[in-house]
Image (cartoon, rainbow, N blue to C red):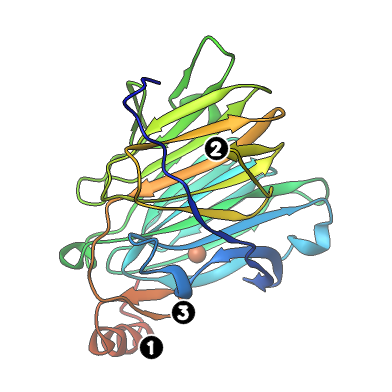
Amino acid sequence: MSETHTSRTVEALVPGRVTSDGAGVRLTRLFERELQQRLDPFLMLDAFGSDHPDDYIAGFPDHPHRGFETITYMLAGCMRHRDSAGHEGFLEAGGVQWMTAGRGIIHSEIPQQQEGRMAGFQLWLNLPAADKLCAPWYRDFSAAELPRGGDAQGASWIVIAGHSHGVAGAVQRQQTEPLILDLSLPAGAAFWQDLPREHHAFLVPYEGSVAIADRALPTGQLAVLRQDGDGVAIEAKSPSRVLLVSGRPLRQPIVQHGPFVMNTRAEIEATLADYRAGRLA
Ligand code: FE
């Protein structure tokens, strides 16, 4: 990290709220509607993590989406995905599932375990208005398939999307340029990530303890970064894991109705009509 860099600072800490979704999966919704403009192009982030089968066993039976992409990152456990576009995937610890709902998809995500730990994140990334009705797309990446970087301090990072320190991530998106990193930092490590000034950025330290500009961040909360630097410097006080996310804002109207995110109320009405008529899948 050169002296000419200025780290962004923390604007807000967001604890999220415990809720349940699907057929009764317990999760922490770190953000949704209230931060969709501030964290544009991202629409939602859920964190799930439990050792109790009752918290996850029911999974997410068939449900629809339109107008955005979902990115699921599994830290522990395994789930099977099936969707109406004919994609099927088995998602295991350390793997990522990237699904572009586009004009519409109906899918299910069902745990493939009766006991043990299930943990991970699901992030929703908006699609540009012109791409909301694109053809659905699906890929899953095992832990071994995900690009990763590392440095002499012993830090390592998985590049799910975007670019970091010369490593190209598994997925790139031209307009929103999402950067999604999972950092593993040993105690005492300092990690620098370049971030374009205009891009919105946030992080979730989920193991250990980290600080930004000497401000200790609570583990498990989402930290929103100000647009006040050309990157972010993250210091690990103990061995830590951090999800770091940024992207270029789309600055388009956001109208959400449950699992559908469009630009206008009329587009939502049309989506509901399509769904009721069986035209979504
Ligand atoms: Fe879903």
- Residue density around tag 2, few if under 14, some if 14–19, many if 20 or more, within 10 Å: many
Rendered view: 116 above or below 81:
above
Q: Disc 2 and disc 3: Cα gap in Å?
A: 26 Å
Which residue is the extreme one toward the top?
A: 152
Q: Residue at x 25, y 77 (%)?
A: 263
Q: Looking at this view, is 174 or 67 the one in front?
A: 174
Q: Residue at x 35, y 69 (%)?
A: 37
Left or right: residue 7 versus residue 46 is left
Q: Residue at x 50, y 72 (%)?
A: 63
- Amino acid marked by disc 2: Gly
Q: Quadrant of the C terminus?
A: bottom left
Q: Nearer the viewer, mark 1 or mark 3?
A: 3
Left or right: residue 103 versus residue 206 is left
Q: Looking at this view, is 97 or 32 the one in front?
A: 32
Rendered view: 209 above or below 44:
above
Residue for badge 1: 276
Secondary structure of the residue carrying tag 3 is loop
Residue for badge 3: 258
Q: Looking at this view, is 7 or 81 the one in front?
A: 7
Q: Nearer the N terminus, badge 1 or badge 3?
A: 3
Measured as percent of width and height from the top left, residue 221 is found at 63, 55
- Amino acid marked by disc 1: Arg
Measured as percent of width and height from the top left, residue 14 is found at 59, 62
Left or right: residue 241 versus residue 105 is right
Q: Nearer the N terminus, badge 2 or badge 3?
A: 2
Q: Disc 2 and disc 1: Cα gap in Å?
A: 33 Å
Secondary structure of the residue carrying tag 2 is loop
Residue for badge 2: 95
